[in-house]
Image: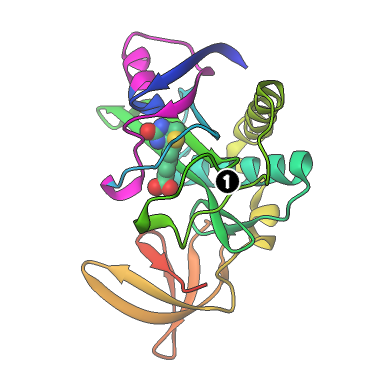
Amino acid sequence: MRNVIHLEEIDSTNKYLKQLGFQNAAEGTTVIANRQTGGRGRMGKRFHSPDGGLYMSILLRPETIDASALLITTAAAAAVSRAIETMFNRQTKIKWVNDIYVDNRKVCGILAESVLSGDKTDFTVLGIGVNLYNTAPLPNDIKDIAGFVCDAPITDTEKEKFALLIYENFYNYYKHLEDKEFLEYYNQRQLLVDKEITVLQGGNARTAVALGIDDDFRLRILIDDNRETLSFGEVSIKL
Ligand code: BTN
């Protein structure tokens, strides 16, 4: 990892790294915190971030416009999934687009935030939060959804090794992002495939069946006897 900044506590590693991005910090600069007091999730939600998790953000300066947030976040999901499987020997599933599940519980969330100048990406902050082990009761809103990768605490050295593995896995994909070499890996671990899902779009909730992922990482669904692809929007599933 390059220029790693370790923090005991911060409001949000994404927010912190964004400031460094504006100050011209180099690609690869990484911030890791032991806990966050204002962890950010997608769709303006907060991300519960107590001790026992890995909260890391990586600064990216993508050269091409094609290196879209979708490719970055799906590559990151494959990278984290691989790191969990290699290091902790747990089987993972990926819930499109980029949540990672172990034993039907969400153990990782990913949030990429891009700063644009004109129509070019100036930089992207890739934020990854992994629940490693439990240190406190979960808040009510996530207690039936969230889970943990490990049954017992791990050492700081192991946590550092895990962060490094995520970083290396991700960079191997990121170097040739347009090749999408992680597509097959990503596809094989889809949590939603063949399941009934709820598609939330523009305030509407519709029931559908997830069929798979296409070559552009869109979700293929069967809805009212028609095939459609989703490139954005939230989907949910009862597990
Ligand atoms: C989600 O599941 O909604 C995405 C959660 C992303 C959380 C990570 S933790 C490290 C980084 N800093 C943040 O404030 N958020 C991301």
- Which segment did they paint magenta? 16-44
Number of marks: 1
Q: Residue furthest left?
A: 203
Distance from mark 1 CB to nearest ligand 1 atom below 8 Å: no
Q: Nearer the viewer, residue 182 or 98?
A: 98
The residue lying at 51 percent from left, 14 percent from top is: 6
Q: In this view, does 11 lie above or below 4?
A: below
Q: Can residue 4 be seen in this view?
A: yes
Q: In which quarter of the image is ligand 1?
A: top left
Residue 47 placement (x, y as % from top left): 38, 42
Residue 25 placement (x, y as % from top left): 43, 10
Magenta includes 33?
Answer: yes
Q: Is residue 112 above or below residue 167?
A: below
Q: Which of 144 and 97 is in front in this view?
A: 144
Residue under numbered circle 1: 77
The residue lying at 64 percent from left, 33 percent from top is: 166
Q: In this view, does 64 lie above or below 213?
A: above
Which quadrant does the N terminus fall into?
A: top right
Q: Nearer the viewer, residue 226 or 204?
A: 204
Q: Dot 1 lies on which element? A: helix
